[in-house]
Amino acid sequence: MRILLIEDDRLIGDGLKTGLEKLGFAVDWFTDGLEGEEALMQAPYEAVVLDLGLPGQDGLTVLKNWRNRGRNEPVLVLTAQGDVDQRIIGLNSGADDYLGKPFALREVQARLNALIRRQNGQNNPLITYKNITFNPQTLKVTADGKEIVLSPKETALLKLLLMNKNKVLSKETIENKIYSWEEEVSSNAVEVHVHHLRKKLGKDIVKTINKIGYILGEE
Amino acid sequence: MKKLSLRLRLMILFIGFSCLIWAAAGIICWQESKEKIDEFFDSYQMLLARQMASADWSHISPQTQNITNKIIKNIRNADDEDEAIGFAVFNAGGQMIFHDNENGKDFSFSTETGSFEKQRVDGEWWRVVRVKSVDGKFYIAVGQELDYRSDITMDMVEEFLAPWLGGLLFLLLLTIFIISKEFSPLKKLASDLENREQDDLSALQTDGIPSEVRPMIAAINRRMAQIDDLLKRERSFISDSAHELRTPLTALKIQLEVLELAGNDEKMRNEAIQKLNLGIERSTRLVEQLLALSRLESNQTQNETYEQIDWADIVKQVEEEYAAAAKEKGIVFKNKTGSDSVISSANPVLCALMMRNLVDNAVKYSPKDAVVKIEINENKIRVVNSGTKVAPEHLKRLSERFFRPAGQKESGSGLGLAIVSRIAGLYGCDLHFANTSGGFEVKIEKAVSHLVS
């Protein structure tokens, strides 16, 4: 789950990036409004966390520009301005959700999960496939009711596959979605993760499609 | 002791004095009447005595008393008027030869004539006068009971004073009514004030308020307007402060959660702890700055003593304080502090606070290897840091509290220049900002209005 974070406060930005990464998201962090706006065009993001007071270009303008250009990634707006007017302007400018400072990391995570779930047309917070259940908030995976321990990247890969059931995902797409800019990706990283998933969850969980990519479910 | 209300005091004083004056008038009236009545009855008594003195008493003896008694009785019956007069006639030997058959028979004998004297007769006090008969052989005593005189006096006084008493009662009622009526606008004002909402600081109505009190009401209204203004500023300061505290609090909260998430990850944990420390330092600095500004805004520094300021010493101390931070960025200080300064007499703590904020900004926002120039002379205090520029649209807003151009890499409260501006203002100076060829310049100069005056 790759997330675009645009926040100019060093401590908040750093905390969100570190924390969300620990919680299984791949996070690209920008502190400048202009750079952040452009970043959305460069990689496939599941959701955006956007601060409003930004240098270069303020958050509301960034948001409006995206919507004008037809981008429909879910956007969670962060702001210190707790007043109702500001929230209404934010939501009317295309924000999908709103968090007033001070907020908790867990809440950001929960809201991001909810936004992504909704974007994928899903209402149940638990994602199930055959005998496997995945909880995006706690990141717990169970098979036949038994908890399976996965590494953060394996969790991210499983979540990605579960959310794109019955769709073929190329190796490149998977890399882009589970790794952020600054992370080193070895050439066989995805293969290794898939291998581990099969080992832990059963051989048929992921199918390899003719060197095009991987699929969970049927083509 | 609680003072009685003005209204009550006026009433008590007015009523008290009215009664006192009325009582005094009554006493004077009684005394005057008594004197007049005494005079009147004395002459009456004397007249009677003289008439009796001119009569021929030589045929009268104690033995004839029985006959005369009858005559006297008849006279008394005919005329009910009892003026409590008694009389007696004595011969030269002191023997009573004739009396009125009533109190007169108890009159004592004396050769003292012509004067009135008080005498006790049958348990009552009598006023008695004695005269010698015309032929010199008899003594006549005529007396009157003093109680009777008193009764007559009291009757007269009562009759005089009765209408006055009515007048007095009417006057008192009128006093109470008028004072109550005149005080009602003040009473209403007081109850209005009493029943006000706690934070209602709107002006008091002066309708119907007597002109003596109006200046007081106007003064109260002015004061209330000032308090209102102060409260509004305080409230906005508090709300701004709370607002500004949200960002560092969010950072702390998130870093704490990161610390919790770190689990066994040593590196992540250490980083989170370091960030938490940074966050706490940042919050502490913000709170310190908030306190400094709040003291300046509430004018708590106004009464502080002024001292001769040694700017060279202050600059030296501040430079030492920031030496480490400056060295890290390769920043060099250059300072030209003259012996005279635009702010020469002031509070040294505030001057140091001002200089620290200026140098703090200069070091924070200068690029690497910049030069920070500090110049102090009789015209200005000037701090220039090379290589920094501030966007023109931001220049004017720099001294607003909490104003920070977005996206600062350095942490700051956004209060430093607001504090500098307030302190400069305390000493009649203005704060100016400019982008010059030498870099970003902050200048403190005497305010124009001060130069004119």
Image (cartoon, coloured by chain):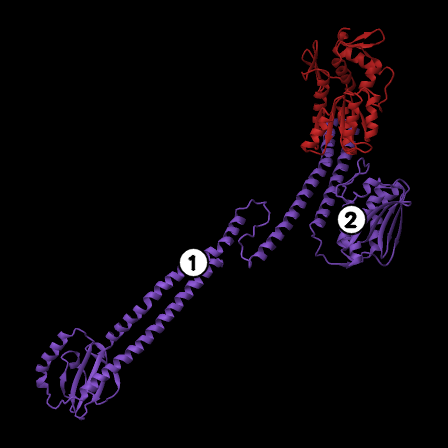
Residue found at x 66% / y 43%: B235
Q: Residue at x 72, y 44 (%)?
A: B290
Q: Please give the residue where the numbered disc 1 appears in the rendered image.
A: B176
For the residues beneath circles 1 and 2, the answer to whether they share a chain is yes
Measuring from the top left, give residue A194's x and y in whole percent.
Answer: 80, 12
Rendered image: mark on residue A50 = none
User: What is the drawing colour of chain B?
Assistant: purple
Q: List x then y, in percent, for residue B300.
A: 69, 52
The quarter of the picture where the C terminus of chain B appears is bottom right
Q: Nearer the viewer, residue A191 or B68?
A: B68
- Label 2 sits on residue: B420
Q: In which quadrant of the rendered view does residue A144 lie?
A: top right
Is disc 1 placed on a helix, strand or loop? helix
| Chain whose colour in the figure is red | A
Badge 1 or badge 2: first in the primary sequence: 1
Q: Which of the pair B116/B70 is nearer the observer?
A: B70
* Tally of numbered tags: 2
